[in-house]
Image (tube, rainbow, N blue to C red):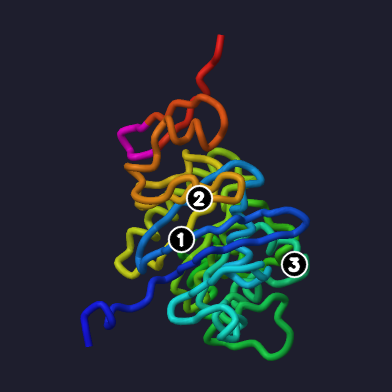
Amino acid sequence: MSDAMMDPPPALRVKGLTFRRGRDILKGVDWTVGRGQHWALLGPNGCGKTTLINLVTGYDAATSGEIQLGAAVFGRTDWREVRKRVGLVTNTLTTYLQSDEPVIDAVVSGREAKLNLVGERNLEWQREAAELLEQVGCGYLREALWGPLSQGEKQKVLICRALMAQFDVLILDEPCAGLDPVARERFLQWLQALMEQAEAPALVLVTHHVEEILPCIGQVLMLKDGRTLREGDKADVLKSAILSELYGAEVELEYDAQGRYRLRLVEVA
C-alpha cells in the first residue's frame, strides 16, 4: 500500500457544496481543513459563512455537494454521531439553552452533542466540566444557571461545552459577538494559548473582523456572494487589495508587532 493511501483523511473537507433556499446562498464551495490546521473563515454579511457551518454540522442539508468529517461522509453515516466529533460554538445555541439550565449541565451536554439534559447525571463528566470551567476562569459558575450569565460568561461556557466533545475540529462562529473590547481581548488571548497546546484540534474561526485573526491561525478562507474568493496561507491571502475586493471598498491592512491585524477604511475625497 502506498504512503498516500495510508495518510489519514483531513479533519474536514467539502466539495462542490451548494445550498439554495429561495436563492443561491452557497455556489459550489471547495475547502479542506487538514488535521491540526487553524483557519479563519472571513467575509461580509450574507456571504454564506454561517450557512457553510450549518451544513458541515448537519443542522441544514446541502442542495448538492459532498461533506466529509474525518472518514465519515454526509449521507452515508449517522451525522448525529459524527456531530459529536465537532466542537461547535455559535450564538444560535444561546436560543436553545433554557434559562434555568444549570451551567454544569450546559457544559456536560457537549459530550453527546445534546441540549437541556434530562435524567441521571454522569458524575465523571460533571467533574470534567468543572475542570474546564476552572481552566477558563469560570469555576465560580459551577452552581450558576445559564439565563443570568453575561455575554462573555456565556461564550466561555459554550467553549467549555465544545471542549467536552471528543472532537476533531473546533468551530467558533463569531465567538466575540456581543463582547466588550476588554472581554474580547481576554477571550482571544485565552484562545491563542489554547491553540498553542501540543494536542490542539483543527480550528475554524468564523469572523467578520481581521482583528480577531490570531497568530496561531495559519490559513484563511474568504467567501463572497456564496463563492470562494480566496483561500490558502494567511500571508498570501490577507492583502489589502484582496480585502478591498472582498468588502467592496478600498481598505488598507495593517500588521502590528504582536502578529495582529487591523483594517482601515481608506477615505475617498
Number of the front mark, 2 or 3: 2
Along the line of sight, the residue nearer the viewer: 7 or 50:
7
* Residue 140 shows in the view: no
Question: Which three-letter amino acid code belongs to the residue tagged 2?
Answer: Thr
Name which quarter of the figure residue 100 lies in.
bottom right
- In the rendered image, the residue lying farthest to the left is 2
At 49% from the left edge and 45% from the top edge, which residue is drawn? Answer: 229
Binning the other alpha carbons within 10 Å of mark 2 as few (below 14), some (14 to 19) or many (20 upward) gives some
The answer to whether marks 1 and 2 mark residues whose Cβ atoms lie closer than 8 Å is yes
Question: Which three-letter amino acid code belongs to the residue tagged 3?
Answer: Tyr
Q: Over which residues does the magenta segment extend?
A: 255-260
Residue 110, given in percent of the width and then of the height, sits at 59, 75
Number of the front mark, 1 or 3: 1
The residue that label 2 is drawn on is 228
Name which quarter of the figure residue 139 lies in.
bottom right
Left or right: residue 233 versus residue 86 is left
Element type where label 2 sits in the image? strand
- In the rendered image, the residue lying farthest to the top is 269
Number of the label disc, if any, that sits on residue 96: 3
Left or right: residue 6 versus residue 96 is left
Binning the other alpha carbons within 10 Å of mark 3 as few (below 14), some (14 to 19) or many (20 upward) gives few
Left or right: residue 119 versus residue 174 is right
Number of the label disc, if any, that sits on residue 31: 1
Residue 266 versus residue 84 in the image, above or below: above
Of pointers 1 and 2, the one earlier in the residue sequence: 1
Measure the C-alpha gap from mark 2 to mark 3.
Answer: 31 Å
Residue 56, given in percent of the width and then of the height, sits at 57, 68
Along the line of sight, the residue nearer the viewer: 163 or 248:
248
Question: Which three-letter amino acid code belongs to the residue tagged 1?
Answer: Trp
Q: Is 78 colored magenta in this rendering?
A: no
At 25% from the left edge and 77% from the top edge, which residue is drawn? Answer: 4
